[in-house]
Image: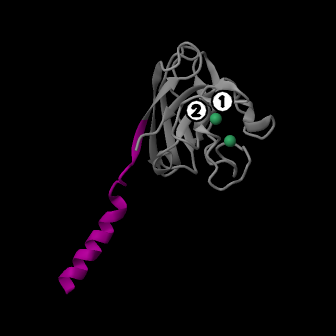
């Protein structure tokens, strides 16, 4: 019995120093809408950390700038019809909002949990700036899609949904 207790104590001392099993997932990002729809632009690597989900992009093929970037509720990059007009990426649905806040506030607010920091494309066309999402984990990605918008993101409801506009790139998280 004393041996068992010693063993348990020994193990409990070990636990804090053992590296956490870091979950991570790579998600391929493709262009949507227009003639080059389907072209693979690269990928993002999502990783659980003590600060939340860290999303590291390796994307090229977009013009330099900062793009609206969100986790949308459905795992589809297909287009859909809105008022009889085909809209790229519409099947991805809205920003993931499991708390039903109905509010777009950016990654550090208390609105849509799918709100992410803008995706930054550098002057040389690469994307190397990680995005931190404190309220997300790799588990949340399953069955949802990342969407990149043509415009930026005000991290507010003014204009609606941060003003990102058209959906230009998309990636569905795997199982
Ligand atoms: Cu979006
Ligand atoms: Zn939002």
- Residue 83 as seen in the image, left or right of residue 48: right
Q: Quadrant of residue 151?
A: top right
Mark 2 vs ligand 1: CB below 8 Å? yes
Which image quadrant: the C terminus?
top left
The answer to whether residue 103 is visible is yes
Q: Give the left or right position of residue 142, taking residue 6 as reference.
A: right
The vertical placement of 8 against 117, above or below, is below
Q: Nearer the viewer, residue 165 or 130?
A: 165
What is the quadrant of residue 157 in the picture?
Answer: top right
Q: Residues within 10 Å of mark 2 (few under 14, many from 20)?
A: many
Residue 169 position in % (x across, y down): 56, 25
Find disc 1 in the rendering and name its residue: 81
**Magenta highlight range:** 1-26
What is the total number of numbered labels drawn onto the structure image? 2
Between disc 2 and disc 1, the foreground one is 1
Tell me: 151 left or right of 49. right
Q: How is the image coloured?
A: one colour
Q: Main secondary structure of the magenta part?
A: helix
Q: Pick the residue in front: 63 or 15.
A: 63
Q: Which residue is mark 2?
A: 147
Residue 12 drawn in magenta: yes
Q: Is tag 2's residue or tag 1's residue first in the polypeptide sequence? A: 1
Q: Secondary structure at mark 2?
A: strand
Residue 36, percent from left and from top: 53, 14
Picture residue at 76% right of the left edge, 40% below the top: 156
Q: 10 Å neighbourhood of mark 1: few (<14), some, or many (≥20)? A: few
Using the image as rendered, state which of residue 89 and residue 121 is in the foreground: 89
């Amino acid at each position: 019995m004393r041996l068992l207790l010693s063993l348990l104590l020994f193990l409990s001392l070990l636990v804090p120093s053992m590296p956490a099993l870091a979950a991570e997932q790579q998600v391929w990002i493709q262009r949507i809408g227009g003639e080059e729809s389907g072209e693979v632009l690269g990928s993002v690597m999502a990783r659980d950390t003590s600060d939340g989900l860290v999303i590291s992009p390796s994307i090229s093929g977009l013009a330099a700038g900062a793009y609206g970037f969100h986790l949308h509720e459905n795992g589809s990059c297909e287009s859909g019809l809105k008022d009889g007009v085909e809209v790229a990426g519409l099947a991805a649905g809205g920003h993931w909002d499991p708390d039903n806040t109905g509010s777009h506030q950016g990654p550090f607010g208390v609105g849509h949990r799918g709100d992410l920091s803008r995706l930054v494309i550098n002057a040389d066309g690469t994307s190397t700036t990680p995005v931190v999402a404190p309220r997300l984990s790799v588990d949340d990605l399953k069955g949802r899609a990342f969407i990149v918008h043509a415009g930026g993101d005000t991290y507010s409801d003014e204009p609606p949904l941060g003003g990102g506009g058209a959906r230009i790139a998309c990636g569905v998280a795997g199982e």
